Image (cartoon, coloured by chain):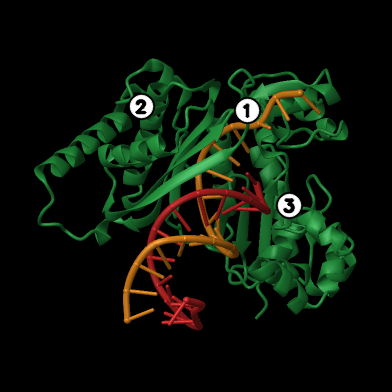
Chain colours: A green, B orange, C red
Amino acid sequence: MERQILHVDVNNAFLSWTAVEELKNGANIDIRTIPSIIGGDEEKRKGVVLAKSNIAKQFGIKTGEPIYFARKKCPKILVINSNFGIYIKYSNKLYELLSEYTNEIQRFSIDECFMDLTHFLAGRKIMDIAQEIKYRVKKELGFTVNIGIAHNKLLAKMASDFEKPDKIHTLYENEIEEKMWKLNISDLFMVGRKNVPKLEKMGIKTIGDLAKKQEKDIHRIFGKYGKLIWEYANGIDNSKVEYEKEKPKCIGNSITLPHDERNIEKIEEILLALTEQVTYRLRKQRMLARVVGVTLKTSDFVVNSHQKKLNYLTDSTKIIYEEVKKLLIELYKDEPIRLIGVKVERLEDEKEKQISLFESKEQEKQGKLDKVIDELKNKYGYNKVTRAGKMQVNNIINLKEEKK
DNA sequence: TCTGGGGTCCTAGGACCC
DNA sequence: TCTGGGGTCCTAGGACCC
């Protein structure tokens, strides 16, 4: 049976949500109607465009580019600092509304959901449901969405990316040639910056050009990735809407520093703050890590990483900090550091842990300490309780509220 | 020009084993 | 002297997404 899939995508999400929040608080201009962008803090060297209004887009401003460029393109642009608390609030509201239509919903990102309505149509036409969702989101939540309708996720996602904003598009198998094949190859999901020039050199300029190539040729040249994008170009995708909440496969925390840093003690202090946040989230997930890693980016944007597989599973702040500190020291070559990152991976459920008869008194003590600190953080707020003593560090590393 | 942060997945090369 | 092949595991790095 053909599946009935929707992809719901919030138009200019961070900017729209900010507009809604501002209007609710009595603002008299709607930032969606002027040249405006949402960006990170330029003073802290996080000055990239995270979202833009449609008018900003007309000036050629692109998501991901430095705010500095955006100002060159449009000197009168209004720049608003990002505020993730707001985004999570509206993301949750959207999710709740969509949940009235099916429980087979996958939160694909903070502003996108896939919905499988195959078993939830209740005699209605899928187009009617999409129209109702679009209307209700606008009326009840105050922002617009694009909705793609198709028989699989890839085509639904491609469809929602057609004309914007506030539009519904279908992309059924018999419409692929007419609606999708004419698009530039860069418009295909999973075809990014690095592979576009390679494909173009092979004479592949549109999605249709890729679709018409021999699968085996693309597979041979690009490996597994080639097979994937060839199938996508032909509208083939059998992946399911993953509506069961999945456990994370890795947890990481990184920060671009306000200034390049070459004082190793300072770097270690930041490393501790990052580790503390990562292990706090790890314990919150009730998971244990087998691999830990450190990433450094130097002032000239060269990225180096070191990781290590432990021969045990742990969620201990102290143990993981000691490991990543060793990795940092191996990695660090007395250069100015722009970014520091910590991550844990090969995660396993806490309950999988073998109960070690030989767990030392020291390990036991650390586990209890972590638990006490976590409880204090939960009670008084993450940044109020910390081991990475210095306020400077606490000020740059903030825990964003978790998604629901 | 000045370039975030959080993820997932894949690949290549080297170590090591039989 | 000059010398296998296959498999697994580990690590580093990179592509892609939003």
Three-letter amino acid code at disc 1?
Answer: Glu
Q: Position of residue A343 (x, y in %)?
A: 43, 44
Circle number at residue A381:
2
Determine which residue is flagged by label 3. Answer: A194
Measure the C-alpha gap from mark 2 to mark 1.
Answer: 24 Å
Question: Under tag 2, what secondary structure?
Answer: loop
Circle number at residue A21:
1
Quarter where residue A151 is shown: bottom right
Instruction: Identify the subunit bearing mark 2.
Output: A
Mark 1 crowd level (few <14, some 14–19, many ≥20, 10 Å Cα): some
Which sits earlier in the primary sequence, circle 2 or circle 1?
A: 1
Using residue A147 as the reference point, say whether residue A24 is left or right of it: left
Q: Is residue A300 above or below residue A183?
A: above
- Give the mark toward the camera: 3 or 2: 3
Q: Residue at x 49, y 43 (%)?
A: A305
Q: Is residue A215 above or below residue A145?
A: below
- Give the mark toward the camera: 3 or 1: 3
Q: Residue at x 63, y 73 (%)?
A: A238
Three-letter amino acid code at disc 2?
Answer: Gly
Using residue A138 as the reference point, say whether residue A362 is left or right of it: left
Whether residue A30 is visible here, answered yes or no, is: no
Instruction: Identify the subunit bearing mark 3.
Output: A
Q: Position of residue A56 (x, y in %)?
A: 82, 30
Question: Under tag 1, what secondary structure?
Answer: helix
Q: Residue at x 16, y 58 (%)?
A: A355
Callouts 3 and 2 in the same chain: yes
Three-letter amino acid code at disc 3?
Answer: Lys
